[in-house]
Image (spheres, grey):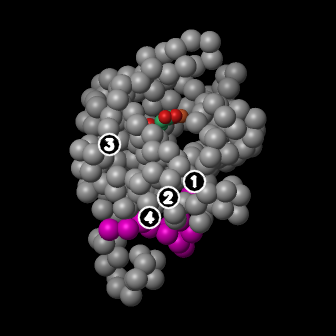
Amino acid sequence: MDFQSSLFGAVATSPGVRPLDGAPHGVERTTLTRGAWVDVLRNFVVGADDVLERLVEDVPWRAERRPMYDRVVDVPRLVHTYVVGEELPHPLLTTARDALSAHYLPELGEPFVTAGCCFYRDGRDSVAWHGDTIGRGKHADTMVAIVSFGDPRRLALRPRGGGESIGFEMGHGDLVVMGGSCQRTWEHAVPKVAHAGPRISVQFRPLNVF
Ligand SMILES: O=C(O)CCC(=O)C(=O)O
Ligand SMILES: [Fe+2]
């Protein structure tokens, strides 16, 4: 029996994902400027503790340096990417990816196929302002769906070329999706904070979006 069709009221405690289009608490869209938007669904993954434990233990984490425009920048966090067809480290991540692919298919036109994982060990780990513009996101609308585990961190967003920034807290089990033109018309970052415990982010992307 899938999560959505469970007969019992106590569904929130059984591991699974909350329905993305479930009334009255489905994804909530915030429309940004220039065709960009952000969707949020709190507690998307139910059973997030178990996923976090598996991610910490089983992902072959490595330190990252990232080409950004004409330079290579140090990225203070650990990373690993699961490419197309690779098994994900926890079955709930597969459930989450499939639910995301099904929900967004009419708008996205293709499934989510890769899973980039980032490990922010403490508040000093971060990612600087950037757009995911390697590949198709540079020219076309696309989506990046982030599922967070562990301590909450802020996803900050600002329009390219200047303007006020906004932020979305990404808590344990939460879903935050950046969509539309977000990667090319806005930038995002996970800023450093004075105090934070470990956080792991899993970003689902369609083919040829990095
Ligand atoms: O940690 C996150 O949730 C965001 C990561 C990110 O923006 C990226 O890896 O491109
Ligand atoms: Fe990014």
Q: What's the mark number on residue 192? A: none
- Seen from the viewer's position, the closer of residues 6 and 30 is 6
Mark 1, residue position: 112
Mark 2, residue position: 97
Mark 1 or mark 2, which is nearer the start of the sequence?
Answer: 2
Question: What residue do we see at 35% from left, 41% from top?
Answer: 200
Question: What residue do we see at 38% from left, 68% from top?
Answer: 16
Mark 3 or mark 4, which is nearer the start of the sequence?
Answer: 3
Q: What's the mark number on residue 95? A: 4
Instruction: Tell me the distance, in whole angstroms, between the alpha carbons under discs 2 and 4.
Output: 6 Å
> Marks 1 and 2: in contact by CB < 8 Å?
yes
The kind of secondary structure element at disc 2 is helix
Mark 3, residue position: 59
Mark 2 vs mark 3: give the one in front: 3
Q: Position of residue 3 (x, y in %)?
A: 41, 76
The answer to whether the beta carbon of the residue marked 3 is less than 8 Å from any atom of ligand 1 is no
Question: Looking at numbered disc 4 in the image, what kind of residue is underneath it?
Answer: Thr
Q: Position of residue 59 (x, y in %)?
A: 32, 42
Placement of 8 over or under 92, stated as above or below: below
Extreme-front residue of the structure: 85
Mark 2 residue crowding within 10 angstroms, few (<14) / some (14–19) / many (20+):
many
Question: Looking at numbered disc 2 in the image, what kind of residue is underneath it?
Answer: Arg
> Marks 4 and 2: in contact by CB < 8 Å?
yes
Mark 3 residue crowding within 10 angstroms, few (<14) / some (14–19) / many (20+):
some
Question: Looking at numbered disc 1 in the image, what kind of residue is underneath it?
Answer: Phe
Q: Which region is colored magenta?
A: 15-28
Question: What residue do we see at 52% from left, 14% from top?
Answer: 72
> Marks 3 and 1: in contact by CB < 8 Å?
no
Quadrant of picture, ligand 2: top right
Quarter residue 126 falls in: top left
Q: Can residue 177 be seen at all in this image of the molecule?
A: no
